Amino acid sequence: MKKLSYLLLVLIAFCFGCKKDKKGSQDNNSGFNIQVIQGNNQTDTIGNLLKDSIRIRVTSNGNPVSNYIVQFKRSNCQDVTIAEKTTSSDGQASFGWYLSGTTGGQWLNIILLNNSLNKKDSVLINATGIAATHGWHRSGCVQNFEVNGVSTLSTGRLLSSLNTVDYPYYSDDNAISWYPLKTFSNSHFIDKIISGAPNEIFIATEDEGLFYSKDNGQTWANISGGIADATGFADFAYTQSGKLIYTDNSGVYISSDKGATWMDASGGLPVGQSYNPCEQLNGDLYIIGSDAELYKSTDNGNTWANLGSSKGNILLASVESLFIDANGDMYLANPHNGPATQGSIYKSTDQAKTWTSIFTKSEVGSSYPNITQISKMNGSYYFSFAGRGVYQTANFSSYTNLATQFAADGLLSYTAAKNSNFVVGSPGFGIFYYVP
């Protein structure tokens, strides 16, 4: 009997402890209490904003308290964002809860702090996330972030950069969830991320130039030595032959050893930022100069020749973007920031000697008809059109606008995930992915 009584007491103590932990770490002597008025136990698709906002009321000894800080911490987001609200005169505060990318149970930790940031009460509420089906969906944890770019690494991991000083963010589940890549510093403004050979990553920043990782982002090295103005970033590329081409305020630099050494390759180019460096199959280099004209180098960047106005070619004198595919076919978009009514793409199969119009469409509203980010992925060509969205085509005879609903956001960054989900980075609304 004594042994049975002892076990019973232990069981009661254990159950009481679980119940207390479940409520949170409330200071029972403070008299403060968080009451959930609305929003608990909702169900929606992962990434979505729950239909009902979370609304709470804070009291002290039964009386509402105002000007107290309430924190809202979402589960499964590594505290990417911790929202803070202040209680109103009636002790209330509300929060719009965007679900993370985790299916099943999710929770929101609501924490009450006084003006000295001392915790006075906390409570957990729950929600259920349903798996995303066909169509467009918001990525978890980065809803409403301003996204500069999204890219796919050779390993299948996705990386994104934000329009602020922060970590790069990564996704290993085809854009469903995003987390900060904390092996890289959060003290940089990241302009562009590209992948080299397997496990190689290059990140261009505005404040410290170019960084390189040879182990899929586990360690990083600054490889900007030899670049005159590495902080004046304009563009960079990693070519099929293994050349790094970096452009900044002062000119163009080329490295054949992944940034160990750099060669000044600005001869013949106008002063200022050049962009869209590309390499042809025979090793010839092409770039768009700061004057928006197309230039070509046949000697690894030692000298550049103007292919535009110097040769009377108006088509090549107002270039917005350039792309060379694996077959050596060249694709050029224009005009560059011009007040024209149409944006066009031209194709050359003879190394820029002749060009054929393959796409033309009018601008929308008062935006310039800029076409950028021409690329090829999984057998299809893609390009971003300001004010219209992102287009897909297999043969440049028929086109599908994949992102019409995001067109008003301007020029969108995009990529294709390993499972073929199409991923769009929005300048103000986070990251979206399309499930076929």
Image (tube, rainbow, N blue to C red):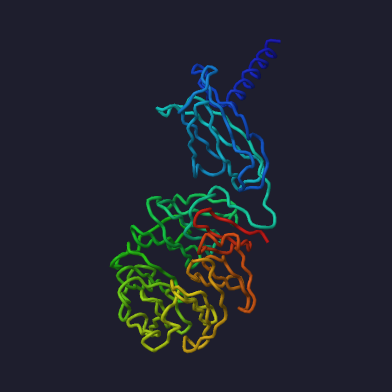
Residue at horizontal 60 percent and vertical 63 percent from the top: 404
Q: Quadrant of the N terminus?
A: top right
Q: Nearer the viewer, residue 166 or 367?
A: 367
Q: Is residue 436 left or right of residue 271?
A: right
Tell me residue 70's x, y (percent): 49, 32
- Does residue 18 lie above or below 406 as drawn? above
Quadrant of image for the C terminus: bottom right
Classify 112 as above or below 205.
above
Picture mark count: 0
Name the image quarter holding residue 339: bottom left
Residue 50: x percent and y percent? 63, 42
Q: Is residue 63 left or right of residue 212?
A: right
Residue at (45%, 49%) from the top-left corner?
182
Outermost residue to the top: 2
* Residue at x-position 53% and y-position 70%: 363
Q: Quadrant of residue 4?
A: top right
Q: Position of residue 210 (x, y in %)?
A: 37, 62
Q: Quick check: 391 left or right of 245?
A: right
Q: Which of these two is toward me, 116 or 107?
A: 116
Q: Position of residue 171 (x, y in %)?
A: 55, 54
In the rendered image, the vertical position of residue 184 relative to residue 374, given as above or below = above
- Of residues 51 and 179, the one nearer the viewer is 51
